């Protein structure tokens, strides 16, 4: 298919073809299946929400920050083992048991968790975790890496 006018732009047909396989193209005229109430699974699966984090370094520290607004420090679990940091907890929605009809429900309530490998070596026994104004800040002292030594070749 030849491009028109601007070589840098994909035309609509090329874009569609890039994302559709031959099978998709042959069944393009067939209507898409529609989910019925019978096919919907109402069982709630227990997948914890994933906590968003910021990770950065200063000269002396590695800092991990996570927005945990609405979480009490008693409901947070922060652990480190072999350079793997895990932050988990529960975010309670409060008293909404009297609600009979939800109009909008965008907030995540329930368990959350995040496990990440720390990008630099840290002193795991020198850690500080502070929860202030809805932000959890976990700070580690970094292990200073020795500069490469020059080896004299004999």
Image: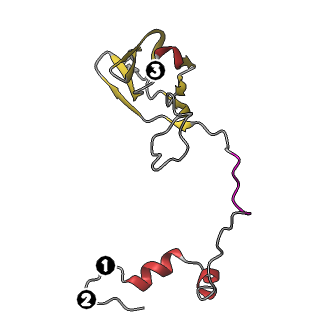
Which residue corresponds to the image point at 45% horizontal and 49% vertical from the top-left?
104
Label 1 sits on residue: 9
Judging depth in this view, the residue of 77 and 33 nearest the camera is 33
Q: Residues within 10 Å of mark 1 (few under 14, many from 20)?
A: few
Outermost residue toward the top in this view: 125
Image coords of residue 111 (percent x, y): 57, 31
Whether residue 42 appears in magenta in the rendering, the answer is yes
Q: What kind of element bears circle 2? A: loop
Q: Which of 16/135 is in front?
A: 135
Identify the residue at horizontal 51%, vertical 14% (top origin): 74
Tell me where residue 26 sits by quadrant.
Answer: bottom right
The reply to whether discs 1 and 2 touch (Cβ–Cβ < 8 Å) is: yes
- Residue 60 image position (x, y, % from top left): 31, 15
Please identify, in this view, whether the residue under mark 1 or under mark 3 is nearer the observer.
1
Residue 103: x and y, percent?
A: 46, 50
Q: Which mark is residue 58?
A: none
Instruction: Tell me if residue 67 comes above or below residue 45 in the rendering.
Output: above
Q: Earlier in the sequence, mark 1 or mark 3?
A: 1
Instruction: Tell me how far mark 1 sits from mark 3, CA to CA.
Output: 45 Å
Q: Which residue is mark 2?
A: 5
Q: Which residue is mark 3?
A: 121
Magenta residue span:
38-43
Above/below status of 32 relative to 106: below
State the separation of the CA atoms marked 1 and 2.
9 Å
Which residue is situated farthest in the left direction here? 5
Expressed as whole percent of the image width and height from the top left, the position of residue 88 reads 54, 25
């Amino acid at each position: 298919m030849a491009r028109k006018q601007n070589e840098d732009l994909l035309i609509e047909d090329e874009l569609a073809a890039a994302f559709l396989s031959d099978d998709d193209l042959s069944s393009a005229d067939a209507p898409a299946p529609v989910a019925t109430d019978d096919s919907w699974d109402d069982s709630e699966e227990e997948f914890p929400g994933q906590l968003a984090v910021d990770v950065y370094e200063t000269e002396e520290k590695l800092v991990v920050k996570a927005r945990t607004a609405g979480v009490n420090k008693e409901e947070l679990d922060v652990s480190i083992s072999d350079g793997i940091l895990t932050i988990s907890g529960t975010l309670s929605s409060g008293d909404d048991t009297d609600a009979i009809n939800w109009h909008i429900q965008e907030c995540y309530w329930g368990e959350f968790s995040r496990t990440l490998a720390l990008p630099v070596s840290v002193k795991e026994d020198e850690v500080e975790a502070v929860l202030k104004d809805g932000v959890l800040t976990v700070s580690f002292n970094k292990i200073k890496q020795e500069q490469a030594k020059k080896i004299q070749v004999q």
